[in-house]
Structures are given as C-alpha cells and as structure tokens.
Image (cartoon, helix red, strand yellow):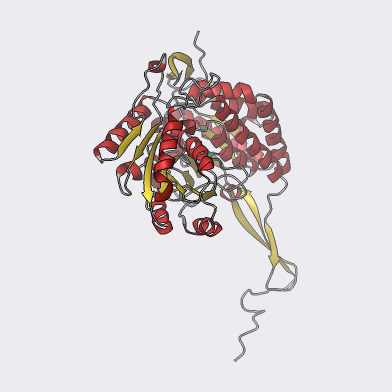
Amino acid sequence: MTKTFQNFIGGQWVAPSDGAYFENRNPADTTDLIGRFPLSTAADVEKAVASASRGFATWRRTPAPARGDILRRVGDMMTKRKDEIADLMTREMGKPLTETRGDVQEGIDTAYYAATMGRQLHGRTVPSEMANKWAMSFRRPIGVCGIITPFNFPMAIPTWKMFPALLCGNACIFKPSEDVPHTGHVLVEIMLEAGLPPEVIQLVHGTGEAAGAAIVNHPLIPLISFTGSTETGRIVGEVCGRMHKRLSLEMGGKNAMLVFNDGDLDLALDGVLWGAFGTTGQRCTATSRLVLQEGIHDEFLTRLVDRSRSLKLGDGRKQGTDVGPLINGSSLSKVERYVDIGQSEGADLLTGGKRPTGKGMDKGFFFEPTIFARVRAGMRLEQEEIFGPVLSVIRFRTTDEAFAVNNDVKYGLSSSVYTRDVNVAMRAMNELDNGITYINAPTIGAEAHLPFGGVKQTGNGHREGGWEVYEFYSETKVGYLDFSGSLQRAQIDNYLGTPD
Ligand code: UN1
C-alpha cells in the first residue's frame, strides 16, 4: 500500500482542499514509489496563513533563549535520526549516503548555531548627542515567512532558512520542492516533536506554480526566502517588488576552479572531481568550469578524464556509489540539450555525454560524468547553468586572463583557486566577483556558521547562514530614552558649531 502524506496546517495533519496528490518516486529506480503527497492550492495557503498569524502572535512573545532551546532539541533529534534521514533522502533525491549524511549534518549545525543565537540576538547601545539620553537598537520579528526550497539540499536549505526565521520569532509556511517532500515532512515532524508550537510551522506541499505562487502572492506574508533557478527567482522578485515584500533570493551559479602551473595538481584533481560531480553537479556551488593554465593543461586533463571514467554511477544507497542519478526526466533532458549545444559550438567532448548503459541504469535518471575541452569563454556551454555533471575546460595563459574568465558570467556564487603563490591567492580573494572564494579547495563546501550567497544574478544582496541571516529575518527598531526632563532638540541644542 502506498503511503499518503498530508499537509501540516492549522496545527494538524490535513488533506489538501482539492483532494489531489502527486507521486514521489526514487530517481535511481522510478518503479520505487515513495508516497503520495498533497497538491495544494491557494485555498490551503489561505488556511496556513490564518493559522501562522495566530502562531506568530504568541511565538514572538516567547523569549529568544527559549526559542533557541527548542531548536537545540531539534538538533539533538536530527543527530539521533541522522542515518535514517540520510537514507530516505537518498531514496527520494539520489545523491550518495555520504552526501545526504552531510546534508543532515548541515541542518544539525544550523540548529545548534541558532540555539546559541537565542542568547545573542543583540542590538547596539550607542552614545546620544544629548546628555541624559540613551540611544539603542534592537531586533523585532517580521511575521509570517514564506519558505520555498529546492531539491538538492532537502534538509540543509530549509533549515538555513527556517531556523533563523524561527529563532527571530517569526512563523513559517514551508513549501519544499515537489521532488523531495518526504524529507520536508520528516523535518516538520521533528520540529513539532521538539516542542515547536504547532501553529508556528505550516507545511504546504505542492508545485511552485500553484502552492509556491500562492505563498509569494499572499498579502499577509511579508517575507519570502527562495532558493531555485534565476528564471523563477526573477518572477518571485517581480511580485515581491510590487508588493513591497522582504525577499532573499539564492539562485544560479557557473562556478570556476582556476588551476595555476604552480598548484598542487593531486589536490586540484580530487577537488575538481568532488566539485563537479558531487551531487551529480546539481549544486548551485558546483564546479562547472575548470580553467587550466597552459603549462599544466594537457597533463591535468589527461589525468582528470582518466579519474572521471572510474567514478561509479549508481544507486546512492549502494556501497561504493560515487555519483547518483539526476533528479528527474526534465533535468536529464536539459543536460542532454547542453551536450548537443556544446558539440554544436565546437567544444571537444572528451568523456561522458550520454546515459550509461549498465544494468538497471535505464530505471533511473543517470547520466555519465561529462567533460568538454577546448571550451572558449563566451560559449553558451561556458556561460549558462546546466545543473548536471557537465564540466567545461578552458585554457589560460596569464593571471589576468584567468580572473577575467571567472568574472565574465552573469552569476557570482563561488570560485576556487589552486596555487602556491600567496600573492595570486590574495589577489583572487580581492578580484574574483563571487560571494565565496576558496583557496586550494573546491567551489563547494560552505560551512553553516558563515554567510552564504553570491553576487550578480546569483542573489539579491542577502546572505544565508552565519550571523548575517539574522538581520534578514528581523527588523531593526531604534529606541531613544530621554531622562533629562526637558526638551532636547537633536542637531540643534547641542550643536557646537564649526570654528570660523
Ligand atoms: C547549494 O548548492 O544549493 O557549499 C547549496 C555547499 C553546500 C551548500 C550548497 N554546503 O556546497
């Protein structure tokens, strides 16, 4: 019997108002049906907003350290269930267990960080211009937050958004990607079991076009946090701009790894394989461009092609699997389309470029790790986000040339530089147009307690993770306290004047 899952709205597990459901299947074996999940509509979102507004009214009055204690318990419970969650996550989205364990760990780290922030949600006290007057700032929550998340980090990304939102005193309406509803379900179950008041969290399953759009367009949701494609982010941004909503966008990437002649090539080789083909290339931080200096270009490429051919494709739940499937059929078609584009642009397909033929491979959305050489800056293959296991290799001569290749794309999430020259490394930190630059490490692997995000069309100026995200989920309020007993006029009464 296929299990049917429900939304969590108004403090209870409930069926969607239309009674319609979608199927969630294992991308490594599409005959494996995980469950049926609600196809929610605007009517479900309406109920969720009404309930979350009630939840917000009481939660905002709960002291921040007490809110943090609940998130600490969430972290404890995730720790206990880490292997079980990793297994169900791999089943629904495909990446190998080592990676899904890391994904859960990122959520645990975020929970414990949030717990400590409960006692640190500080503002500032600064001197006033006047005697007997205090001036200070402090944080207030914002309200009901709309949280819309992608499939590639089914636990980490929702926690990055919701834990800081909740710690600051907001309520959340959570719509996980329709490719990973099971992990979203388990996360909400854990939050409730840890003691989060039921109306503070609402889980609304469904598609972006229906449930997601209803959240973005709802007038009583003043804040939206969205991770997904730059195209969808643009639509979300237009609506939020029109409705004056606070919005955090985390979108595409076209991240480059620059390997210089003096770099540690063994290290860079491990780094690029992990960066390009980890999560089957479906990370916004994935290494999708490898920029090699001419002195090491040929040797490095030969070694890379060799190593990438030995990566083992398969079911992420099986021991020894290096690369799992893509998430779904449309993602697979997109990757195939880009292989055609690369070839028609004149790039050299060195390895991969097709679906594997091994046993059972036709049951899932598998695609071989793919490497294109002789890619020139400006080709579509080099400029556009593919979100799959496709790596473009570009040759360079000078440092300036390498930096220009890195910067000449519309995205700006992460970059990576392999060199032993401290001057080049420091210049890269200063000159590469990305939110994150790694030296002697690949473009992936951001840690939960540092700000995460990118420049240009990767984002809209906000950061997730670390301390900065707490600014996004709270509003600064300023208080002046005048205890002089007389009218003190700012800028006038204490003005000392400029000497003539
Ligand atoms: C993403 O690719 O959407 O830095 C997030 C990393 C992970 C997060 C990636 N910690 O690769």
251 on left or right of 199: left
Q: Residue at x 65, y 24 (%)?
A: 81
Residue 373 in view (yes/no): yes
32 on left or right of 66: left
Q: Residue at x 42, y 14 (%)?
A: 360
335, above or below 448, in the image: above
Residue 80: x %, y % from top left: 69, 25
In which quadrant of the rendered image does the C terminus lie? bottom right
Residue 7 in view (yes/no): no
Residue 93: x %, y % from top left: 48, 25
Residue 485: x %, y % from top left: 75, 71
* Number of numbered labels in the structure image: 0
230, above or below 399, in the image: above
Residue 434: x %, y % from top left: 47, 51
Q: Nearer the viewer, residue 80 or 177?
A: 80
Q: Nearer the viewer, residue 112 or 4?
A: 112
